[in-house]
Image: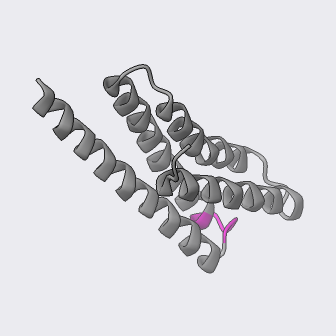
Amino acid sequence: MPKSILRDKSYAFAIAIVKACQHIQKEQKEFVLSKQVLRSGTAIGALIVEAEFGQSKPDFIHKLSIALKEANETKYWLSIMYDTDYLDREYYDKLDSECKEIVAMLVASIKTLKAKTNKDF
């Protein structure tokens, strides 16, 4: 399988999310918000991998679009966790920055794919 920066970044982000959630659940005994961010934060990479095996270009774009929605949802949950003092500023900034980078990459990928798809018709 060819190297994919987006796939690699989303995988590394998922690992960081899992570790953050493990810490929050163990140290702060918080399970509701951490499960939300765990679900959305790990779904991003799973959807990117799923998109790579899409049945068509529109299917590929659709899966990346869902990954983008999950990334935006993750940003929301991270903000909630920061504003309720479950994440300190430094760790929040790191995760938020990584998430924003993935969002930007997904937006660029989707725009490029849609432009190429429109040229095919």
Q: Quadrant of the C terminus?
A: top left
Main secondary structure type of the part rendered in magenta: loop
Residue at far top of view: 55
Q: From the top left corner, tell me how far across and down residue 80 is, in percent.
A: 56, 57
Residue 77 in view here: no
Residue 66 in view here: yes
User: In terms of depth relative to the viewer, which is nearer, 68 or 121?
Assistant: 121
* Quadrant in the picture for residue 95: bottom right
The answer to whether residue 119 is above or below residue 7 is: above
> Magenta residues, as a range?
82-87
Q: Quadrant of the N terminus?
A: top right
The answer to whether residue 83 is above or below residue 118 is: below
The answer to whether residue 102 is above or below residue 36 is: below
Q: From the top left corner, tell me how far across and down residue 46 is, in percent.
A: 59, 38
Residue at figure coordinates x 82%, y 57% from the top left = 22
Q: From the top left corner, tell me how far across and down residue 97 is, in percent.
A: 48, 69
Residue at far right of view: 26
Residue at figure coordinates x 20%, y 31% from the top left = 117
User: In terms of depth relative to the viewer, which is nearer, 3 or 77?
Assistant: 3
Residue at far bottom of view: 90
**Magenta span has 23?**
no
Residue at figure coordinates x 35%, y 58% from the top left = 104
Q: From the top left corner, tell me how far across and down residue 111 is, in percent.
A: 24, 45
On the rendered structure, is 36 left or right of 22? Answer: left
On the rendered structure, is 25 left or right of 113? Answer: right
